[in-house]
Image (tube, rainbow, N blue to C red):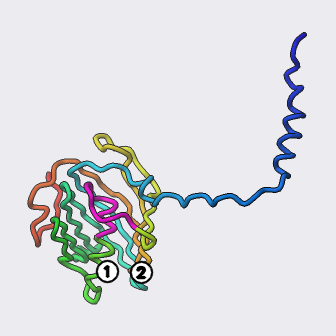
Amino acid sequence: MTPRTGAGIPALLVLLSALACAPRTPGPRSFPPPEPEAATIPPLPASYRMVHRVRLEVRGRSFDFIGYLAVRGESWRAVAYSELGGRLFDFLCLPPRREVLSAPQGLPRKPLREGVMNDLARVFAPGPGPPPPGRETDINVRTLRRVEGWPGPVPERLTIANRRWGYAMDVFLLRLDLRPVGEDAFREGERPREEE
C-alpha cells in the first residue's frame, strides 16, 4: 500500500484553524529590541579618516556642512566647514580631554560636548567610548557599504536624533581613507587634512 501524500493536509488545516481560534491567555510581554547601534554599528579599525556631508538641525536652526573626521585609537577630531569654507565646528577628543574648540556663535558648548560629541564617539570611535545611548538618542544606520580593508560594512548614511538636546543629524559618507592618522590631525588650529 502506497501512502497518499495529500491525506494529512486537511487534518493539519483543521488543527491550525482550531489553534488560531482558541482563546489565548495573556503571557509575558516581549523584551524591547536592543539599542539601535548594537546591531547596526559595525566594528571599526584603529585608525582612519572620513569625509561626510552633514545636515544638522538644532532647535529651529539648520546647518549644512562638510565634516572631516580623523580617528586614532580612542582619540578623534571632527572639524566641520560650511560650503564656503568657514569653520563651523571643531571637536577634539584626546582622552580624558574633550573640547569644543570652535562652534557657531550663540550655540552653547554643553549640548555640543555632552550631546554631539558623545553621539559621534558612539558611532565612530573604537574603544570603550561613552556609555551606550539611553532613551535620549536614536542612531539609525540607513545604508552600509563594503570597503576593502575595513573590518565590516561602512556606515554610508546614518541619522542621529538626540531628544535631550533637541537636534538631529543626517550624515552621508563622501570619502574614506584607511591610511594611518598622524599627530598633526590633533593639533589645535589644524584641519585633519588628507595626506597625499
From the top left corner, tell me how far across and down residue 67 is, in percent.
28, 66
Residue placed at 85% from the left, 52% from the top? Answer: 21
**Is 3 rendered above or below residue 25?**
above
Is residue 78 within the magenta segment? no
Tags 1 and 2 touching, CB below 8 Å = yes
Q: Nearer the viewer, residue 58 or 118?
A: 118
Task: Residue type at mark 2: give it.
Answer: Gly
From the top left corner, tell me how far across and down residue 66 is, in percent.
29, 67
Q: Residues within 10 Å of mark 2 (few under 14, many from 20)?
A: some
Displayed quadrant of residue 108: bottom left
From the top left corner, tell me how far across and down residue 145 is, in percent.
40, 48
Circle 2 is placed at which residue position? Answer: 166
Circle 1 is placed at which residue position? Answer: 111
Q: Nearer the viewer, residue 70 or 121?
A: 121
| 109 relative position to 41: left or right | left
Choose the circle earlier in sequence order: 1 or 2: 1
At numbered mark 1, what does the secondary structure look like: helix, strand or loop? helix
Q: Which disc is residue 47 wearing?
A: none
At numbered mark 2, what does the secondary structure look like: helix, strand or loop? loop
From the top left corner, tell me how far across and down residue 61 is, in percent.
39, 84
Q: Residues within 10 Å of mark 1 (few under 14, many from 20)?
A: some
Q: Nearer the viewer, residue 52 or 116?
A: 116
Q: Which residues are magenta?
A: 118-133
Residue placed at 34% from the left, 60% from the top? Answer: 123
Task: Residue type at mark 1: give it.
Answer: Pro
| 115 relative position to 73: left or right | right
